[in-house]
Amino acid sequence: MKSIITIIAIIAFGHVATAQTGNVATAVIASSIVCDHCLECGTCGGSIDDTLLGLNGVKNIAIDVKANTITVYYKPEKIALDEIKKAIVAIGYDADEMKADHQAYDKLDACCKAPE
């Protein structure tokens, strides 16, 4: 009898854990990344990866330079989309309707800035 109860408890716990970890949202954020070099640049690309992947709840990112987008895979129960956008803005890039922080933008390499 104890074995059956233990098995049922393990199965029930497994379903709860799967439900909690399986909720990953996807957001495609329009940004101001302007060159392929940005992804490899220590100043820019490393900063994007380190910053976004360092946020609790962000699982993965994909940057599309041609489309000027950052696709973020995240857990909405751990982090709000606005927090992710604020992190992008803080490193010098636009994030949808939010404009890049001027001081952070000024620190980007010249090739990683939008042509004026």
Image (cartoon, rainbow, N blue to C red):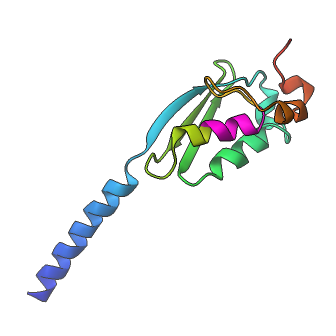
Query: For the point 72% across and 23% down, which residue is it?
Result: 32
Left or right: residue 79 versus residue 67 is left
On the image, the x and y values in percent for residue 99 come to 71, 25
The span shown in magenta is 85-92
Look at the image and say whether residue 15 sits in the magenta stretch: no
Image height check: is 111 above or below 89? above
On the image, the x and y values in percent for residue 68 come to 66, 21
Query: For the point 59% across and 42% down, which residue is it?
Result: 83
On the image, the x and y values in percent for residue 37 come to 82, 29
> In the orientation shown, which residue stands out farthest toward the top?
116
The one of 4 and 77 positioned closer to us in this rendering: 77
On the image, the x and y values in percent for residue 94 come to 70, 26
In the picture, the quarter occupied by the C terminus is: top right
> In the orientation shown, which residue stands out farthest toward the left?
1
Magenta stretch: helix, strand or loop mostly: helix
Query: For the point 78% across and 43% down, which residue is it?
Result: 46
In the picture, the quarter occupied by the N terminus is: bottom left
Q: Quadrant of residue 85?
A: top right
The one of 103 and 47 positioned closer to us in this rendering: 103
**Total marks placed:** 0
Look at the image and say whether residue 88 sits in the magenta stretch: yes
The one of 13 and 85 positioned closer to us in this rendering: 85
Query: For the point 28% across and 62% down, which residue is it?
Result: 16
Image height check: is 64 above or below 62? above
Left or right: residue 102 versus residue 71 is right
